[in-house]
Image (tube, grey):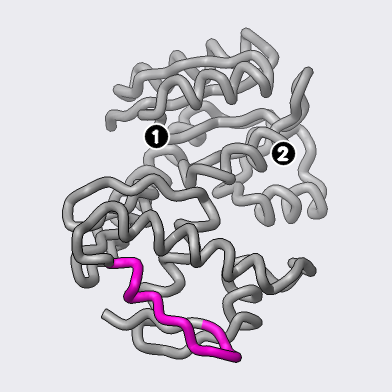
Amino acid sequence: MSGKILVVDDEARMRKLVRDFLTKDGYTVVEAGDGEEALNVFYEQRDIDLILLDVMMPKMDGYEVTRQIRESSQVPIVMLTARSEERDELLGFSLGIDEYVTKPFSPKTLVARVNAILRRSSQAGAEEKISISGIVLDKQAHTVTVDGTPVELSFKEFELLQYFLENKGIALSRENILSNVWNYDYYGDARTIDTHVKKLRAKLNSASDLNRGEMIRTIWGMGYKFEA
C-alpha cells in the first residue's frame, strides 16, 4: 500500500512502533506529539490520507482535534485509546471517528485495519462524485468545481450544496434543510439557511459566466429547490 499517515501520540515509543510497521508496509509517516502539533502538521501537509489519533494527550485531546479537523476535512481518522467505555466510543463516532483501536493492540492488525479503511475510501471516492450542469462535487476530496473552475466553500456550504444536488428537483423546506444539514440538535434561527444560500449562490455565480448559483431557486414561504 501507499499513502501518507499522520501518527499522533504523546508517547514517542508508541509513535516509533506504529511508524516502523507502517513504513514497512509502504506508507509515508509523519508524526505529532500532541493535539496542537497534530493540527499544525495536518494543515501544513494537506496530502495526509489517514490519521491515527491518540485520545489522551497534552494541550488538546483527540476529541477536540477531531472536532476541528471535521470542520474542513473528511480524512479517515482511527482513534487509539486505552479506554473502551461505550460512551467514549459513541462520542468519538458522533464526532466523525471512522474506527476505534483499543490499546494494547497488535501492530500488524492495526496496519491491516489501515489498509482496509484506505481501500474503502478509495473505492468510495471513485463513486462519490456528483456532476450536474457543470457543477462537480467530490465528496471524498471535499472539492467543488463549476465549469472546471475550483470553488472554495466552507464546510457547511459544501454540505448544503451536496444536499441540494442529491435532492435535485425536490422542494425542500427550511426545516427539512436544517434537520438534514445542520442536524436535529440545531436550535438556531432558520434564517441562517438564507445567509448560507446567499453566499453559496454568489460563489457559484462568480466561478462561471452562466450564473450556476441561480439553479438554487427560492420557493417563497417554504424554502428552496435545486433545478438544473
Question: Residue 70 appears in which quarter of the rendering?
Answer: top right
Residue 216 magenta: yes
Mark found first going from the N terminus, 2 or 1: 1
In the rendered structure, the answer to whether residue 136 lies left or right of residue 121 reads left
In the rendered structure, the answer to whether residue 51 lies left or right of residue 136 reads right
Residue 80 position, x and y percent, is 65, 33
Type of amino acid under label 1: Asp
Residue 110 position, x and y percent, is 51, 34
Q: Judging from the image, what secondary structure is the residue with disc 1 in? A: loop
In the rendered view, tell whether residue 84 sits above or below residue 29. Answer: below
Residue 57 position, x and y percent, is 75, 22
In the rendered view, tell whether residue 109 sits above or below residue 153. Answer: above
Disc 1 marks which residue? 49
Q: Judging from the image, what secondary structure is the residue with disc 2 in? A: helix
Q: Nearer the viewer, residue 186 or 94?
A: 186
Disc 2 marks which residue? 63
Q: Nearer the viewer, residue 109 or 10?
A: 10
Type of amino acid under label 2: Tyr
Q: Residue at x 62, y 9 (%)?
A: 13
Residue stretch in magenta: 212-223
In the rendered view, tell whether residue 20 sits above or below residue 116. Answer: above
Q: Nearer the viewer, residue 18 or 165?
A: 165
Residues at discs 2 and 1 in contact (Cβ within 8 Å): no
In the rendered view, tell whether residue 81 sits above or below residue 135. Answer: above
Residue 94 magenta: no
Q: Residue at x 33, y 47 (%)?
A: 119
What quarter of the picture does the C terminus occupy?
Answer: bottom left
